Amino acid sequence: MIIGTAGHIDHGKTALVRALTGVDTDRLKEEKARGISIALGFAYLPAPDGGVLGFVDVPGHERFVHTMVAGATGIDVVLLVVAADDGVMPQTREHLAIVDLIGIRHGVVALTKADLVTAERRAEATAEIAEALAPTGLAGLPVVPVSSVTGEGIDDLRARLFAVARDFGRRADAGAFRLAVDRSFTLAGTGTVVTGTVLSGRVAVGDRVTVSPTGLAARVRSIHAQNRPAEAGRAGDRCALALTGEAITKDAIHRGDVVLDPALHAPADRIDARLRLLPSETRAVSQWLPVRLHHAATEVGARIVLLDDAPLSPGREGRVQLVLERPIAAAAGDRFVLRDVSASRTLGGGRFLDLRAPARKRRTPERLAQLDALALPSPAAALAALVGRAPWLVDLTAFGRDHALSADERDRLAADLDLVRIADRDREIGLAPDTAAALTRSLGAILDGFHADNPDLPGLGLERLRMQVEPRLPAPAFRALLQGLARAGVVALDGAWVRRPGHVVRLSEAEERLWQRIAPQLAGAERFRPPRVRDLAGLLAVPEPDVRRVLKLSARSARVDEVAHDHYFLRETVVEMVAIAADVAATSPDGTFTAAQLRDRLDNGRKVAIQILEFLDRHGVTLRRGDLRRMNRHRLDLFGSGARTTDVLSPGRITSDPGETEPGRESSPVGRPDFKSGRGREPVSGGFDSHSLPPSIRSRSVP
């Protein structure tokens, strides 16, 4: 358990800690000379039950309140120190307000210098303390008269602290690991060491961590927890971590940084929060008010944006957005304190709600309803409320990260709520079961209506369908959902098109008769070099536009593929050519082949062979580098049926299958290639064409 001192300057905080623990927490030469605390001091006291109480001694001078706030973060119990001769003083009240704002609800009051006053003065000071505590969450704390000089009351105070520790228990180490850094230094033989309080989770020797917000990667070389060598540290411990890494030095890590699980690294510079303004303030908060934000051990400039209609008056609480001068590492639910820019007084404080606050539309009814959900006291309650209101979905990956949840905790929350989870490579979206069922019904109704109105079209474009369905999923999640529905037989995916499984493009009687005349011309011995649209029109004595229309409609039903402009091949011929190309590649020691080799096997001339290979390049079936190509084994069955079925959509996890090939002609949701402009003719990402963009850029999807 961590105990933090609080109180006015020269009320005996450091002397009291020395009397309790035997440790002088004033370690700096200047502190010794001036007789006041300037920096945070630390001491430890073994408890009878085998545990260790850690003490954080904070400065009492008004100039060092920012240091006091850094020390108060992460403490479990406050030791409020009030001198019997002075009574409650300005910094006593400010420290008490800060402790109340950061949510400390356990503690003891030490009435120091009791040997210097009469019994009547002790009673007066005790009454003053009770009055100061009354409006806070610390009302009713016991007051223990003590003297660090005579030793009066020290044993009683120590016993009371042990009792509080027993009642408080050990803080649960749930959540992902976070440690707020308050010191960084170099230790001979050890290297770079950081100290701080573990805010959540646990860390072990050898763990990989990240220093946020800078993003420096590090490994934990050794640990001291509660001033003892340890193999692990956990929430509530004062820890010293010896870190090693390429860029890890004492000057690279600063007070206010957070050492954390790499999955949590996502600094925030615009945060929605609930703010309580202290009753001692004389004016309401104005829009865009500059303040100093204190969170954990960091201090940063910020501006306040009011989100409620009414002004935030002294003693009131409201929703605000905090726009920071620079990003910080934080978690939703963390406490914060605001002080004025002159560092002369504390204005108020509260709790972070959303680390990804929007810059626009931040006061809409939908957004304010989301903030009401996020203001609920636990992540479980917040998640349950969020999936039940617009936009009716939650990014579970971001929710878990921003609430500092471990992966197991996030999965358990989703399972407890029976959420339908749609997983893509980078994130997972959660929907309530009723929402997922309504989405599926809506999607099916849209497709049914489209097919009824457009029987000659193969289906609805993926992006157009996404924009019509509510809730509107991010593009990667929507594709993963469609793949799950396709495996369940609810929809069929035909490249860029989405359709009902039973829908096929139907030709009119006249068009069907013309198709029956065209098909034989594309088959037989000439199937690898079929006539073009103009040639077919001449052979059949049919207007060229009619031939082109029938072939385009036939392409939509996968009877043919437009390999080049106005040059159509039967689908079975395309499948055969893919098999031949794979056979040619298999005969090569390194799996590569040239256009000439394919031309010789197909016996169709270099120009047509090049057109066929460019067609296969566009669909990612072949991968090109210079004049060489190799086969992409993941897309060899792109032009086959590839039908799959699985369980119907239900609570659980739906994932996209990176190796799954979808039936149809199009490999890209942007539509068919434009052969004249070249649009859509670039090789599919994943190829090794030297002219193509890297896969990490080409494959990025934007919601």
Image (cartoon, helix red, strand yellow):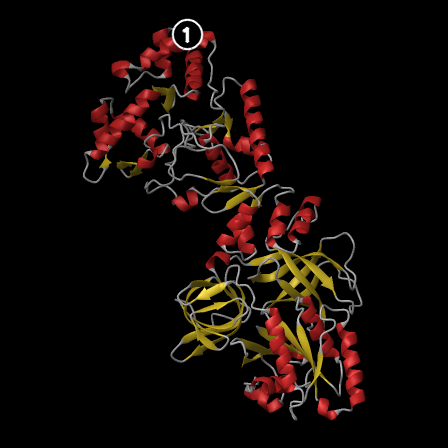
Residue 66 in view (yes/no): no
- Quadrant that contains the N terminus: bottom right
Count of numbered badges drawn on the protein: 1
Q: Nearer the viewer, residue 207 or 608?
A: 207
Give the residue drawn at x 78%, y 70%: 280
The image shows residue 143 at horizontal and vertical percentages of 72, 80
The image shows residue 475 at horizontal and vertical percentages of 51, 39
Q: Is disc 1 surrounded by few (<14), some (14 to 19) or many (20+) residues within 10 Å?
A: few
Q: Looking at numbered disc 1 in the image, what kind of residue is underneath it?
A: Arg
Relative horizontal placement of residue 79, taking residue 600 as reference (left or right)? right
The image shows residue 416 at horizontal and vertical percentages of 56, 47
Give the residue drawn at x 59%, y 67%: 296
Q: Nearer the viewer, residue 1 or 667?
A: 1
Query: Picture quarter containing residue 578?
Result: top left
Numbered disc 1: secondary structure: helix
Query: Picture quarter containing residue 97?
Result: bottom right
Above or below — where is 275 with respect to 31?
above
Q: Nearer the viewer, residue 612 or 361?
A: 361
Q: Which residue is mark 1?
A: 513
Query: Picture quarter containing residue 541?
Result: top left
Residue 223 in view (yes/no): yes
Give the residue drawn at x 53%, y 59%: 175
Above or below — where is 201 with respect to 629?
below
Q: Nearer the viewer, residue 687 or 79?
A: 79
Relative horizontal placement of residue 425, taking residue 357 as reference (left or right)? left
The image shows residue 364 at horizontal and vertical percentages of 70, 45
Relative horizontal placement of residue 635, taking residue 83 as reference (left or right)? left
